[in-house]
């Protein structure tokens, strides 16, 4: 089984299209999305519609939380909050209703999928978790692997039952150890923050027990122009370049 895992599309339709094109030629059996389909980017409704039309299971991200329950808007910094208020204006009622059905986590193929941090947080960042909390999470987690997003930084956390190892991920194939547990941050399709502005996603091969990290180019200038035209904060445009 080959599973493509995508996250943090952030209304970047151009990036999503190129990632899905690459997935389509990569002999993938299924696709799972880790949330934050919206926010920052110029085309939230078309992105969510594409996720819906392709029947891609998706968990609730913190940006979806803010759209479906606006009390969460106070959780965001002023620039992100401004972006989300504009995003709400760009979304149809039908799309918001669809987003409200996203679950906090999914279990597929004996693996956990969550936006922020296991077991079910959409708002906890990986860098906020102490070593003691991390060990406790691994020991409580029934699944061997958990895929997360949220930070927009690729990283793999490996637990052998005693020691936790954190390693940045690059464009490569990474072999896993069947005796170990993993929390794997798959980066961002629509707004990477790791110094490389290509769209990022991973393919998990359950038979080979490895992950392939993919870097996908797309027309970033087009997206920048769309962000400006949509009246979104300019800072969310130029961070793509």
Image (cartoon, grey):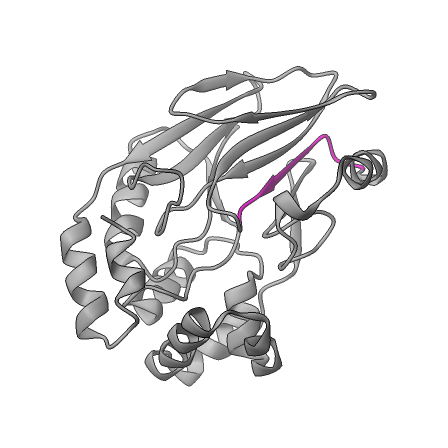
Q: Is residue 214 magenta?
A: no
Residue drawn 36% across the image and 66% down it: 49
Query: What are the residue bounds of the magenta stretch?
Result: 142-149
Q: Position of residue 240 (x, y in %)?
A: 27, 51
Query: Is residue 180 toward the left or the right of residue 75 in the image?
Result: right
Q: Is residue 181 above or below residue 104?
A: above
Residue 82 locus on image (x, y percent):
40, 77
Residue at 29% from the left image edge and 39% from the top image edge: 198
Q: Residue at x 73, y 20 (%)?
A: 180
Left or right of 63: which side holds 89?
left
Q: Pinpoint residue 238: horizontal percent, then vertical percent.
A: 24, 56
In screen coordinates, is 143 left or right of 87? right
Q: Position of residue 120 (x, y in %)?
A: 71, 54
221 in relation to 134, above or below: below
Q: Where 189 sits versus 43, above or below?
A: above
Q: Quadrant of residue 88?
A: bottom left
Q: Which residue is located at x 46 percent, y 35 percent?
A: 29
Image vertical order of residue 46 relative to residue 161, above or below: below
Q: Nearer the viewer, residue 227 or 47?
A: 227
């Amino acid at each position: 089984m080959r599973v493509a895992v995508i996250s943090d599309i952030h209304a970047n339709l151009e990036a999503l299209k190129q990632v899905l094109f690459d997935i389509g030629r990569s002999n993938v059996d299924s696709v799972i999305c880790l949330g934050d389909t919206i926010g920052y980017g110029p085309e939230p409704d078309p992105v969510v519609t594409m996720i819906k039309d392709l029947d891609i299971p998706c968990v609730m991200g913190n940006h979806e939380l803010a759209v479906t329950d606006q009390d969460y808007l106070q959780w965001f910094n002023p620039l992100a909050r401004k972006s989300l208020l504009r995003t709400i204006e760009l979304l149809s009622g039908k799309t918001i209703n669809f987003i409200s059905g996203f679950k906090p986590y999914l279990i597929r193929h004996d693996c956990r999928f969550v936006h922020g941090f296991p077991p079910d947080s959409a708002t906890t960042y990986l860098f906020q978790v102490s070593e003691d909390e991390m060990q406790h999470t691994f020991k409580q987690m029934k699944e061997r692997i958990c895929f997360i997003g949220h930070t927009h930084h690729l990283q793999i956390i490996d637990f052998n039952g005693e020691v936790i190892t954190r390693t940045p991920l690059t464009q490569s194939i990474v072999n896993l150890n069947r005796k170990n547990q993993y929390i794997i941050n798959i980066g961002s399709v629509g707004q990477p923050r790791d110094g490389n502005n290509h769209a990022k996603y991973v393919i998990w091969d359950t038979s080979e027990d490895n992950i392939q990290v993919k870097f996908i180019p797309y027309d970033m200038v087009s997206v920048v122009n769309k962000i400006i035209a949509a009246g979104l904060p300019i800072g969310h445009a130029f961070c793509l370049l």
